């Protein structure tokens, strides 16, 4: 076993232990009640006229998230088409 | 990549309309059922990618111009941001749902509770779903088509 493999194993072990300990230190399942989901469940149909609360969150309450996703897709398409711009028939 | 056998081409011919119809259904009913613009666009784009697999990227590349796909992708993005800016103009703030109670289309407000799904609801959400769907279909199809064609050039030179 070379030195490089030993170093990699030690670093991976430290990383895994760090993440597992961090996850175990957090309390799971709290807070039990939040106000945000109750607000969305009770006000979705009256405020936005939508029966699907998930679509309402994605496109209305959290519209800037969707704008970011659209920007990411636009950047991906622009990058790929820019890399392969010289390819013709 | 050259085209595959006649069996594969016939099967893709048969299943292609159904995949496209299902994708467009998921986009159009995004405000009623699970799914939306991204998911339905991914379904419809996978139907288009099936054509690349069956017929070969060279055939599809000659039929469809990538610049047009890129233009449709940009149109989808502009439509999405345009609807958001119409909210700024008519409603007062960015991403305002200005069609929901006062507009001409999609203005029905369902009763609170368990109600039936009416299509004519939800304000600007169907428009945004449609814009995002066009964007995702054209974007994913353009990416896969260009990359498949580039790899097929390398195969032909060898």
Image (cartoon, grey):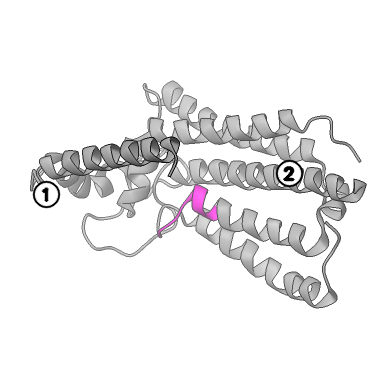
Residue under disc 1 on the same chain as residue under disc 2: no
A21 or A27: nearer the eye?
Answer: A21
- The spot of residue B138 in percent (x, y) is 67, 44
- The spot of residue A78 in percent (x, y) is 66, 30
B87 or B23: nearer the eye?
Answer: B23
Residue at 76% in and 70% down: B13
Q: Which residue is mark 1?
A: A29
Q: Which residue is mark 2?
A: B147
Q: Secondary structure at mark 1?
A: loop
Residue at 42% in and 22% down: B88
As drawn, the label of residue B6 is none
* Bounds of the magenta segment: B34-40
Q: Secondary structure at mark 2?
A: helix
Asked whether the residues under the numbered discs 1 and 2 touch, taking CB atoms below 8 Å apart as contact, a structural biologist would say no
Subunit ID for the residue under disc 1: A
* Quadrant in which residue A8 is drawn: top left
**Is B148 included in the stretch rendered in magenta?**
no
Q: Is residue B157 above or below residue A8?
A: below
Residue A21 appears left or right of B15 = left
Identity of the residue furthest to the bottom in this view: B7
Residue at 86% in and 60% down: B2
């Amino acid at each position: 076993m070379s030195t490089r493999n030993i170093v990699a194993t030690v670093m991976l072990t430290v990383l895994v232990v760090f993440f597992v300990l961090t996850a175990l230190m957090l309390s799971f399942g709290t807070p039990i009640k939040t106000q945000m989901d109750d607000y969305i469940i009770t006000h979705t149909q009256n405020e936005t006229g939508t029966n699907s609360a998930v679509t309402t969150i994605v496109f209305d309450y959290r519209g800037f998230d969707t704008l970011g996703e659209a920007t990411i897709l636009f950047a991906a398409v622009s990058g790929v088409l820019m890399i392969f711009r010289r390819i013709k028939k | 990549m050259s085209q595959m056998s006649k069996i594969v081409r016939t099967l893709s011919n048969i299943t292609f309309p159904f995949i496209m119809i299902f994708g467009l259904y998921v986009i159009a009913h995004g405000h009623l059922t699970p799914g939306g613009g991204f998911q339905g666009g991914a379904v419809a784009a996978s139907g288009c990618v099936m054509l690349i697999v069956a017929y070969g990227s060279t055939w599809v590349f000659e039929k469809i111009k990538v610049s047009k796909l890129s233009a449709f992708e940009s149109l989808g993005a502009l439509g999405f941001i345009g609807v958001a800016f119409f909210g700024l103009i008519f409603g007062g703030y960015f991403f305002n749902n200005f069609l929901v109670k006062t507009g001409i289309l999609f203005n029905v407000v369902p009763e609170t509770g368990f109600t039936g799904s009416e299509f004519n609801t939800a304000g600007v959400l169907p428009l945004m779903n449609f814009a995002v769907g066009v964007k995702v279909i054209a974007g994913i199809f353009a990416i896969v088509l260009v990359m498949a064609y580039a790899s097929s050039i390398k195969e032909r030179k060898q």
